[in-house]
Image (spheres, rainbow, N blue to C red):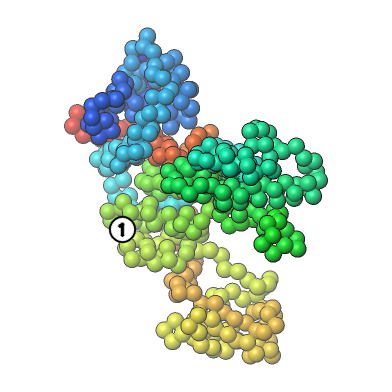
Amino acid sequence: MAGHLLKAGSVFAFLAANRQELFPDEMFADLFPSGRGRPSVPADVMAAVITLQALHGLSDSETVDAVTFDLRWKAACGLPVTAGAFHATTLTYWRRRLAASDRPNRIFEAVKAVVAQTGALAGKTRRALDSTVLDDAVATQDTVTQLIGAIRRVRREVAGAVQVIAEHCSAHVYDDPGKPGIAWDDKQARDRLVDALVSDAHRLLGYLPDQQLGPRAAEAVALLALVAGQDVEPAEGSDGADGRWRIAQRVSHDRVISTVDPDTRHAHKTVHRRQDGFKAHVAVEPDTGIITDCALTKATGADNHEAAVGLGLLDGEDSPVTVLADSAYGTGQFRAELTERGHLDRVKPAPVGRGNAGGFTVDDFIVDHANHAATCPNGLTRLISRTGIATFGAACAGCPLRVRCTRSRTGKSLKVGPHDARQRAARQAARDPDWLADYRQHRPMVERTIAWLTRGHRRLHYRGVIKNDHWLHHRAAALNLRRLTNLGLHHTGTNWVIA
């Protein structure tokens, strides 16, 4: 081995010296309860390899080459210079074992336990939340490609589908790996093809024999049904009952964009930037950059919104913290939950809109929440309805401030949400110089951790939320370990400490 040549303070040097203390055999004992089928590669070696693979963003084949030829990897894993590496499928085997276990993210948990034991976060009561879009590992597919791919998948997975396709589906030769041979610049030809493919999908679903479907077959059938409906609508002049279809003139909500990876989605992190992939959410201690928790979700959907996921990232906090986040997290429900848990709200409020230049905002209206009344800038008061609407209506007709208040012909209607008082208080608090100073000093530090997370690794290697979430936890564990080694992490023989 060549451990003495490793750079001091590097992850390689740390693993070479402390691999077995960080990843003891008993930590992985439940993965092989029978004692049979246990791989010949020791658990601490595989855990070290998985960590280094996530740190450097290598494929399985590249990882095997690194273990075979890179002296740093050999030293970190405790292997002799002349030792050969394992086969690349060993990594797949271990990932599957971990994924099927009760603790699939145990490597992240092990590093997190080291963080706790060192006291690296002792007295550090701020947590910054943020998210970023990670590119998927598949190509985005158009409607035609998705329909053909979904039909082929049903043919592979469902018993009896081959016969149904042969007898009832004629829009395409589904053994042909290419696209249908039509004039793709001819709109009518494209419309006829889409109509025929959707009809094939409906006939396939309708003629499949009644049977108990296994998980893979059920997923294939459900995907075909979804794809056959999400991008099409009745053709012009059709009521939908005659089986004539065309590509819909709108984009469906939460649209599946690939039959190869049905979990990937179109994502708009900004108005002008669209990506296809998943969303990675992180909670970070801003002074050290250590990731305290993370999660990977689909890029769209209410359950995957920053405010919904962000609360889960704070579940592991034993005591109240100051939560710093941008306006994506600034929903009233999120603020209410922070208050209920005892956390301090440092979430940036979303800007309030103006109807026109120089116009009033909702903050120019005085709302008496106790008496359910709202007063406009001209001093007119109206009661707030049970649905949260204060209607000024005809009283706006002769108002000298109307041009700054509303452009509606029927007068101003003010929407007062269930968390209006909390949101107004948040906007008022965010104007305080001390609040702004704290936010501007600590909130941007999460961007540094996001940069560490994505630098050279924005494109994912796996398909689906579950596999990529496991990768994200391994990546976070590796980054945390690198950060700890930079801070002087070492083992005294009994405890983890930072020099």
Quadrant position of residue 435: bottom left
Q: Is residue 343 left or right of residue 440?
A: left
Q: Residues within 10 Å of mark 1 (few under 14, many from 20)?
A: some
Q: Is residue 499 visible?
A: no
Q: Position of residue 475 (x, y in %)?
A: 42, 36
- Note whether 366 is above or below 116 in the view shown: below
Q: Nearest the camera: 67 or 404?
A: 67
Q: Position of residue 427 (x, y in %)?
A: 49, 68
| Position of the N terminus by quadrant | top left
Q: Is residue 44 left or right of residue 248?
A: left
Q: Is residue 22 left or right of residue 277?
A: left
Q: Position of residue 70 (x, y in %)?
A: 43, 17
- Residue type, mark 1 in image: Pro
Q: Which residue is mark 1?
A: 320
Taking the spot 26% from the left edge, 30% from the top edge, the residue there is: 32
Q: Could you tell me which secondary element the residue under label 1 belongs to?
A: loop
| Residue at far top of view | 82
Taking the spot 40% from the left edge, 49% from the top edge, the residue there is: 283
Q: Nearest the camera: 61 or 236?
A: 236
Quadrant position of residue 332: bottom left
- Note whether 36 is above or below 224 in the view shown: above
Q: How many marks?
A: 1
Quadrant position of residue 44: top left
| Position of the C terminus by quadrant | top left
Q: Is residue 176 visible?
A: yes
Q: Position of residue 63 (x, y in %)?
A: 45, 23
Taking the spot 34% from the left edge, 38% from the top edge, the residue there is: 100
Q: Nearest the camera: 51 or 485?
A: 51
Q: Is residue 287 left or right of residue 182?
A: left
- Note whether 347 is above or below 417 in the view shown: above
- Note whether 328 is above or below 355 in the view shown: above
Taking the spot 44% from the left edge, 52% from the top edge, the residue there is: 129
